[in-house]
Image (cartoon, rainbow, N blue to C red):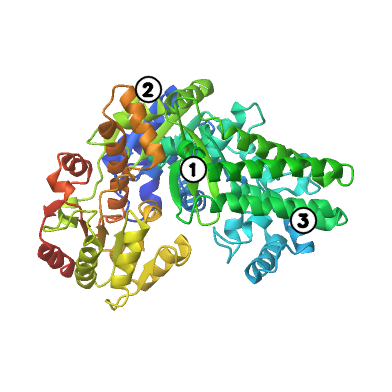
């Protein structure tokens, strides 16, 4: 069956899906993907919202005799593809291809760790104990061990570190539950399958492992298809770099303490050593002050308090190593953690080596933990070598790859040499369906009066839209200030990021039908709200990365050394792609109508504002909030 037939008016899709109509943009993309697979080429397609890009790459993958791996940017899209889109399309095309879903190891239940913790309750935290009981019940019923199917256990549940495994603490073939291991079963199923759905993190984790010469985590394929491909350069940087974080170190202390209590409780020296190390690791975080955020690691090393705190952690790790040596003949369980202690000690010692060029050395602090990163500034040659080694075909697609109608920024960032590249416009009639407003008389984006102005504008929009509004922010601080100003000033329910998990907040927003949702970066993409539940999106300012972000500073300096203009080649493209993602939340269907309000004068006053506007869908524009109110009030 040809691609033309599949997507024709009398084709299998038209017979299977009511209201299906052929879209030339979708057919063109599907044809390009099909030809790329046949010729082992590289295909890049920016497909505007509503093109139907998912079926445009799934149909060729199902019809081809090749083995395909489809990688997505989020677990939500991964599950939607596997549980909804693939079965529907297989049914329509009458193709019985063997498909598999494969996630990273943290998503699967580790029955060995669950049993260990049920036997020796790890904490007196009632939340963890309650969740542990829920997971134990799930363990008796599940066939996949996929923790996403465990009702009541969210992505950030406290119990997860107790019931899943990491590459560090997994016992591999030495595990007594190895034959029943859910990760092993998922990988075996992926090797047998003809089409495997993974995510970008797993793809790069696999490449990093292959690079070290270990067995791979997932099978090889003839074709790799990346959806939400705009995320790849950032994720690649993380995986081709190195990082060490204190959260993992606390997990190691916890694992050793469990062995100490259950197997060698008379080794009192071990208990004391673990307590001391736990205190010095916590002290290291305290040395960075209360504020969370990012900073330059080289500058941090110039601070004597931080330097001394890090030396104390390394000293205590070394002492733990000596104590564990004495325990090796007492229990087999100590061997694996013993190796992890050596690994951590080496990583922390390497954190003092900051002289290599071409890398950014930076740190990140959260409320309780610190992560030290060594990140390569350019991943294009590394990614290119991966592609060259595989001899497979590669397809990259997303609704947001281009900047000012050009794909050059994306191809350069990954070292690609595409055999096909195209920008496929959305079929939506943005002129009729949407209105873009850049309000007049705004204070400058950094002005102290800005949050107050945002509250005033948001009130007007929320009332006109009868709720049904997304407020997207570039900073938590401004989001919280606006929330305080709005919370009691409107009759419509307000849900803010951080009050619950992302999934629950979105469900509440959709269920209410007239609510307001406030979010930062993670709500700018991968959120699909169709129909009249969402009529208005307000964005507080253009999403430029913070100028004091050490990774951004290092990339800009690197661009300068290479003779490029740092703002044009680094800052601007990143911000344009982020804005396009935020804008993409508004119109998700050909019947949707809505208003986009961007509260940043720079769209009008700065020359680069034109680059942003050219990269957005072709909406009618206004500077009048009255016109916006009228538009919203007239949406049926």
Residue drawn at x 58%, y 49% as measured from the top left: 284
Q: Earlier in the sequence, mark 2 or mark 1?
A: 1
The disc label shown at residue 363, or none = 1
Q: Nearer the viewer, mark 3 or mark 2?
A: 3
Residue marked by disc 2: 417
Front disc: 1 or 3: 1
Badge 1 marks a residue whose secondary structure is strand
Residue at numbered disc 3 = 258
Q: Nearer the viewer, residue 393 or 132?
A: 132
Q: Residue at x 26, y 59 (%)?
A: 537
Instruction: State which quarter of the image contains the N terminus.
Output: top left
Q: Quadrant of residue 568?
A: top left
Q: How many marks?
A: 3
- Counting from the top left corner in percent of width and height, residue 116 is at 77, 57
Q: Nearer the viewer, residue 388 or 49?
A: 388
- Residue 166 left/right relative to 333: left
Residue 569: image quadrant is: top left
Separation (CA) of disc 1 from disc 3: 30 Å
Locate residue 485, reporting x and y percent.
Answer: 28, 71
First of labels 1, 3 by sequence position? 3
């Amino acid at each position: 069956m040809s691609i033309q037939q599949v997507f024709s008016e009398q084709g299998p899709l038209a017979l299977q899906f009511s209201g299906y109509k052929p879209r030339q943009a979708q057919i063109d993309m599907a044809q390009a993907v099909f030809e790329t697979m046949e010729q082992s080429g590289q295909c890049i397609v920016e497909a505007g919202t509503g093109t139907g890009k998912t079926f445009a790459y799934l149909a060729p993958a199902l019809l081809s005799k090749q083995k395909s791996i489809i990688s997505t940017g989020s677990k939500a899209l991964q599950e939607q593809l596997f549980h909804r889109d693939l079965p529907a399309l297989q049914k329509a095309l009458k193709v019985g291809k063997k498909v598999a879903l494969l996630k990273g190891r943290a998503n699967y239940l580790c029955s060995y760790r669950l049993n260990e913790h049920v036997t020796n309750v790890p904490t007196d935290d009632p939340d963890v104990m309650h969740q542990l009981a829920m997971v134990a019940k799930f363990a008796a019923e599940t066939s996949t061990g996929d923790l996403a199917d465990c009702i009541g256990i969210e992505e950030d549940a406290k119990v997860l570190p107790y019931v899943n495994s990491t590459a560090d603490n997994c016992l591999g073939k030495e595990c007594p539950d190895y034959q029943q291991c859910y990760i092993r079963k998922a990988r075996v199923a992926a090797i047998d399958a003809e089409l495997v759905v993974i995510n970008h993190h797993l793809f790069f984790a696999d490449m990093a492992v292959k690079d070290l010469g270990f067995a791979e985590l997932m099978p090889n394929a003839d074709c790799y298809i990346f959806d939400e491909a705009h995320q790849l350069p950032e994720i690649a940087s993380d995986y081709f770099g190195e990082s060490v974080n204190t959260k993992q170190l606390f997990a190691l202390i916890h694992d050793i303490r469990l062995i100490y209590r259950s197997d060698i409780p008379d080794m009192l020296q071990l208990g004391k050593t673990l307590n001391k190390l736990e205190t010095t690791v916590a002290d290291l975080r305290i040395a960075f002050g209360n504020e969370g955020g990012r900073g330059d690691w080289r500058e941090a090393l110039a601070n004597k308090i931080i330097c001394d705190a890090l030396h104390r952690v390394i000293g205590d790790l070394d002492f733990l190593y000596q104590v564990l040596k004495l325990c090796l003949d007492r229990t087999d369980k100590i061997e694996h953690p013993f190796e992890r202690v050596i690994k951590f000690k080496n990583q922390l010692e390497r954190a003092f080596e900051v002289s290599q060029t071409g890398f950014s050395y930076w740190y990140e602090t959260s409320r309780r933990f610190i992560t030290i990163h060594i990140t390569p500034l350019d991943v294009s040659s590394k990614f290119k070598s991966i592609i060259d080694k595989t001899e497979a075909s590669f397809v990259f697609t997303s609704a947001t790859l281009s900047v000012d109608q050009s794909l050059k920024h994306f191809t350069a960032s990954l070292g690609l040499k595409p055999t096909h590249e195209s920008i496929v416009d959305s079929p939506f009639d943005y002129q009729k369906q949407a209105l873009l407003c850049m309000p007049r008389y705004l204070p400058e984006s950094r002005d102290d009066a800005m949050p107050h102005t945002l509250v005033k504008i948001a009130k007007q929009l929320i009332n006109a839209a009868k709720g049904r509004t997304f407020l997207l922010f570039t900073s938590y601080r401004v989001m919280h200030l606006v929330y305080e100003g709005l919370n009691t000033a409107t009759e419509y329910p307000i849900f803010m990021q951080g009050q619950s998990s992302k999934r629950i907040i979105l469900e509440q927003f959709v269920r209410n039908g007239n609510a307001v949702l406030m979010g930062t970066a993670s709500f700018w993409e991968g959120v699909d709200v169709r129909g009249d539940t969402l009529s208005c999106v307000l964005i507080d300012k253009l999403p430029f990365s913070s100028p004091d972000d050490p990774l951004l500073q290092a990339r800009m300096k690197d661009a300068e050394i290479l003779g490029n203009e740092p703002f044009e080649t680094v800052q601007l493209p990143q911000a344009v792609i982020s804005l396009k993602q935020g804008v993409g939340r508004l119109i998700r269907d050909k019947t949707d109508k809505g208003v986009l309000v961007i509260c940043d004068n720079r769209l009008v006053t700065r020359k680069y504002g034109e680059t942003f506007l050219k990269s957005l869908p072709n909406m009618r524009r206004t500077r009048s909030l009255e016109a916006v109110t009228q538009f919203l009030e007239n949406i049926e």
